[in-house]
Image (spheres, helix red, strand yellow):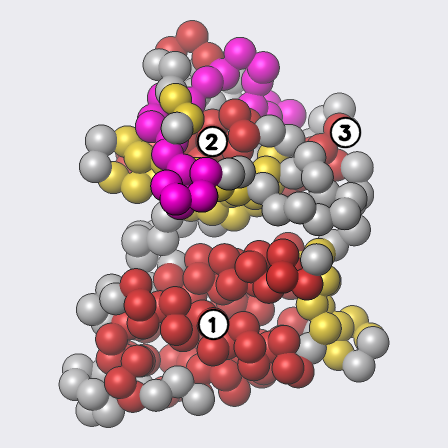
Amino acid sequence: MQDDIGALLRSFLNNALRKQPQRRIRDFGGYEVGKRRNLHVIEPIARDTADFLCTYLRIRLRGEPASREGVASTVAAALKNVSDEFAYKLTWHSDEAWSTVCNSVAEFLEGCLQIESKPYDGSLTAQSDYNGWKSWEMVISGETPRGRWRHSWKEKPGDDFIGFYGDACMGRIFKIDLTGFDERWYWLIAADGSPRRGWPAAGYEASARSAACRVERIYFALVKGEGRTGEDQRGGTTLRMKAERRIPGSFG
């Protein structure tokens, strides 16, 4: 159980940190090892990360709910401990460096805070406006993915897939064995530093198909430069991708 929470925390940290603007990452890492680093960007990075974590996880301090400001302060303290070498490697888009930094921040948070999954709120089976999406944004029953979805780990096939459209990585979907959350498929949009235009970077759906379709909807909207709106656009131009226009995808 705790291992599952740790994996989820690290996945969310990876997404929250890697989606930061490239300018912030460059300021944090510097232009050479230990040279021209602007540590003032740690505070906004920490605030964004705390907002993300507090949205999807229950975080406590000594048994009481932790404030977003408190979580941000803890994330900031962890980021200040990142070595000059690894901070600079982040500017190279080094997966090893990102993994090391995310693991370091996660271990710091786990040492200071109690982190749990949020209790199931029944939102996946609600009839409207469930899990943060409006009724006209819901993934419909006949909708299928159009990209290629492959196992994240070829050596260990399981409930974890990465989606590609051509050579581009769209995002990841995965299932975590958590009591009360067995039906949830989490999804993450691939972090490339581009503006999100109001679209969330992570969430969950009731099935692998729905999660893959959600990732693809957001990915293609971002490619087109389309932002998320708060209005039902079915009467005119819609951002909703209709099932009959989709090409069946595959999981493997």
Residue appearing at x 46%, y 13% in the figure: 243
In the figure, is residue 70 to the left or right of 251? right
Question: Is disc 1 placed on a helix, strand or loop?
Answer: helix
Sort mark 3 into few (<14), some (14-19) or many (20+) by Cα contacts within 10 Å.
Answer: few
The image's mark for residue 225 is none
- Report the quarter where the N terminus lies: bottom right
Q: Residue 75, percent across and down?
A: 54, 78
Residue 130 location (% of width, % of height): 69, 34
**Residue 43 visible in the displayed image:** no
- Amino acid type at image mark 3: Ala
Disc 1 or disc 2, which is closer to the eye? 1
From the viewer's side, name the closer residue of 205 and 245: 205
Residue range in magenta is: 134-157
Precedes in sequence: disc 1 or disc 2: 1
Q: Looking at the image, is 77 positioned above or below residue 18?
A: below
Q: Estimate the x, y position of residue 211 in percent, counting from the top left.
A: 53, 33
Is residue 4 visible in this depiction of the protein? yes
Q: Nearer the viewer, residue 164 or 221?
A: 164
Res. 212 mark:
2
In magenta segment, residue 22: no
Residue 78 placement (x, y as % from top left)? 50, 83
* Foreground pick, 41 / 171: 171
Query: Does residue 49 lie above or below 142 as drawn?
Result: below
Which residue corresponds to mark 3?
126
Closer to the chain start, of discs 2 and 3, is 3
- The amino acid type found where label 2 is placed reads Ala
What's the distance in space between the residues labelled 2 and 3, CA to CA? 20 Å
